[in-house]
Amino acid sequence: MVKLENSMNMALSDSIINLDHGDPTAYEEYWKKIGDRCTVTIRGWDLMSYFSDVTNLCWFLEPELADAIKELHGVVGNAATEDRHIVVGTGSTQLCQAAVHALASLAGTQPVSVVAAAPYYSTYVEETTYVRSGMYKWEGDAWGFDKSGPYIELVTSPNNPDGTIRETVVNRPDDEEAKVIHDFAYYWPHYTPITRRQDHDIMLFTFSKITGHAGSRIGWALVKDKEVAKKMVEYIVVNSIGVSKESQIRTAKILKVLKETCKSESENFFEYGRDMMKNRWEKLREVVKESDVFTLPKYPEAHCNFFGKSLESYPAFAWLGTKGETDLVSDLRKHKVMTRAGERCGSDKKHVRVSMLSREDVFNAFLERLANMKLTKTIDL
């Protein structure tokens, strides 16, 4: 039987637990231990210009952030950075919109279809429909997509929400109108084995999910094609006239400290993060096993090049399901637990996305409520 923490903050006993958003506060304790090593001092006259490096295609990218990104990918071995343009954005959300805009604007005909294999990241729907652009159109699930003409497939790997390793689904390798955007927000060793150095045309990464610093709102894209990178930069300039320099400088500092910890036996951030995620997943699986009504995906082990051994995946989100017919998001809401409905991810009412990245007391409160739940059967009239 799983042992739940009795030291849970009493303030949580009757409060709403919001695990809908992936707010990565789980890593706060680690960064507290690091202390002032990540502190950045910015004087009143620093960073006042719009421009960072006028010789760079992405002229608002701070050079020290570009260096830190390349160095970290080099140490982790999860993505190729050579012969690529780095485009910085206000989180990977802005970069995904910029990439879709860039690819659609360079297409021969419009609107360009945009698809993702279900279950997919629900925000993709909002990103591609909110401004009602005539350049592209959300066409839904890639598994059933057979429309002719140009299209963009969004591939998230490990996948958000279900944590599976993904490749393209539509697969038209000889079609010059077929474009792919790879979202590797969670392709880091504390979540999944690093099995290869990814090498794709457009690869998106986010500072938020690596270290937990979501408030800095920094992401970056590694882009092969110069014209695509130029169009992405143009989009960001129109959208926000660049990206906060203060956030970039802070990100650069933290990424460099993170890289340094990779050599440490006692402070390795990825080791810390992996141990924490492993512990949480083991606790959740035990609650699910004892309930006999919930389900969770199983993940195969794979050799991790970063850690040098075979490991299992411990995704940032749990794709929680039920064995019976029930509206799971509603049942959880009755217990004051907010989650992301499976229907928003192109799936069904029996599934929800649960963030695994909350503070420890919040996560333990969630486990306690889940263990005490009784589900309501859905009756369709």
Image (tube, rainbow, N blue to C red):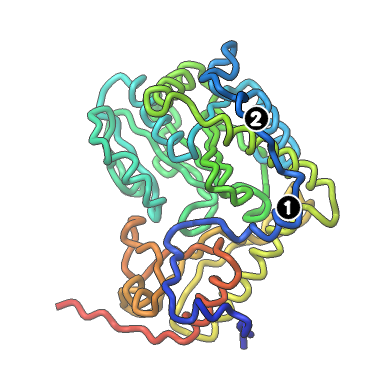
In the rendering, which numbered label is found on residue 43?
2
- Residue 245, by quadrant, is top right
In the rendered image, the residue lying farthest to the front is: 44
Residue at horizontal 64 percent and vertical 58 percent from the top: 28
Comparing labels 2 and 1, the label whose residue is closer to the camera: 2
Residue at horizontal 67 percent and vertical 55 percent from the top: 190
Residue 288 is at least partly visible in this image: no
SS for tag 2?
A: loop
Percent coordinates x, y for residue 152 in the rendering? 37, 34
Residue at horizontal 75 percent and vertical 47 percent from the top: 36
In the rendered image, the residue lying farthest to the top is: 55
Q: Is residue 168 above or below residue 107?
A: below
Q: Residues within 10 Å of mark 2 (few under 14, many from 20)?
A: few
Percent coordinates x, y for residue 49 in the rendering? 54, 19
SS for tag 1?
A: helix
Amino acid type, residue under disc 1 in the picture: Phe
| Left or right placement of residue 361 versus residue 373 in this view | right
